[in-house]
Amino acid sequence: MRILVCVKQVPDTTEIKIDPVKHTLIRDGVPAIVNTFDAYALETAARIKDANPGTTITLLSMGPDQAKDALRECLAVGGDKAYLASDRKFGGSDTLATSYILATAIKQIEKTDGAFDIIFGGKQAIDGDTGQVGPEIAAHLGIPQMTYASTVEIKDGEAIVKRESDEGYDMISVPLPCVVTIVKPEFEPRYPTLMSKRKARKAEIGLITFEDIKDIIDETRIGLKGSPTKVKKTFTPDRTKNTVRIEEEEPAAAAAKLVNLLSEAHIL
């Protein structure tokens, strides 16, 4: 079985600050990490690998050269091979353009390495929270998709997915090949060993540039020009701490007082 896991290097959101004048992210000095949900996706893939001898895990990311650090982290905890899609022409891509580039890179990898049985990704990136790239990759590739998966098992050519829903969980089977995006599961990602870290540092990471895929990609659909959405402004909402405490002995009296206050404030 051949598995591909899409991973993204993101800024640590606990350290992010907004420039009050330019309203842009201050990235200087902010550490970069592997997207949390992608780490869950990799652990899910690694567990399938443990249960199915002979399974291989290929990693794919898109970004600048420093994204190789994230790929090496993933190689140390279950990945067998890694590729980075990186080119100035890819810069400024929104989710639609990004998913198109990744889908095209997947097709390029499959030319030499063989077709993938299942493609994993996190349900969303913690820096953008759109949850769009995984499903869009499936659409570009023309294969089934399953989102919000908590656990995944492979049986008789199908992925048996425990899918998170508003009312609990659904058990759904999806034929292979397919794309599956992962939520926070009941287990935590495994830790790398000293030996796996050393091996990952020495591993060669394949580079996929525009020139490598120019024959199978539409240049008008990538980068800023190929992105139908634009981020006009990023800002931190103003927060106030003005509060009103309602203290009544009876709940009905507290509710009536709350309604009066909301009415006076023209909220109701």
Image (cartoon, rainbow, N blue to C red):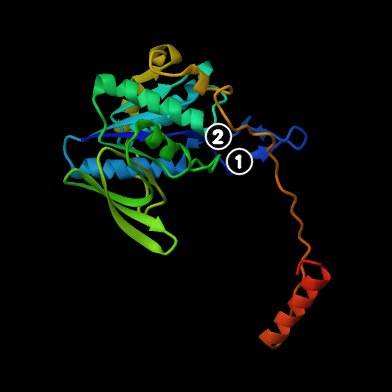
Is 177 on the left-hand or right-hand side of 20?
left
The disc, 2 or 1, on the residue closer to the chain's N-terminal end is: 1
Q: Give the percent coordinates (x, y) of residue 186.
A: 36, 56
Amino acid type of disc 1? Glu
Quadrant in which residue 266 is drawn: bottom right
Between 199 and 24, the one lying in front of the other is: 24
Give residue 35's position: percent from left, percent from top.
47, 39
Q: Secondary structure at mark 1?
A: loop
- Assess disc 2: are there few (<14), some (14-19) or many (≥20) residues with their C-alpha within 10 Å of its C-alpha: few
Is label 2 in contact with label 1 (beta carbons under 8 Å)? Answer: yes
Going 24% across and 49% down the picture, which residue do you hit? 153
Q: Quadrant of residue 55?
A: top left
The residue indicated by pointer 2 is: 31
Give the quarter of the figure containing the N terminus.
top left
Residue type marked 2: Pro
In whole angstroms, how far apart are the C-alphas of marks 2 and 1? 8 Å
Left of 70 or right of it: where is 197? left
- Given residues 261 and 241, the one toward you in this image is 261
Instruction: Give the quarter of the figure containing the C terminus.
Output: bottom right
- Residue topped by disc 1: 15
Q: Could you say where residue 38 lies in the image, as x and y percent from the top left?
A: 41, 40
Q: Pick whichever, 217 or 190, lies toward us.
A: 217
Q: Nearer the viewer, residue 22 or 28?
A: 22
**Side (left or right) of 196 relative to 96:** left
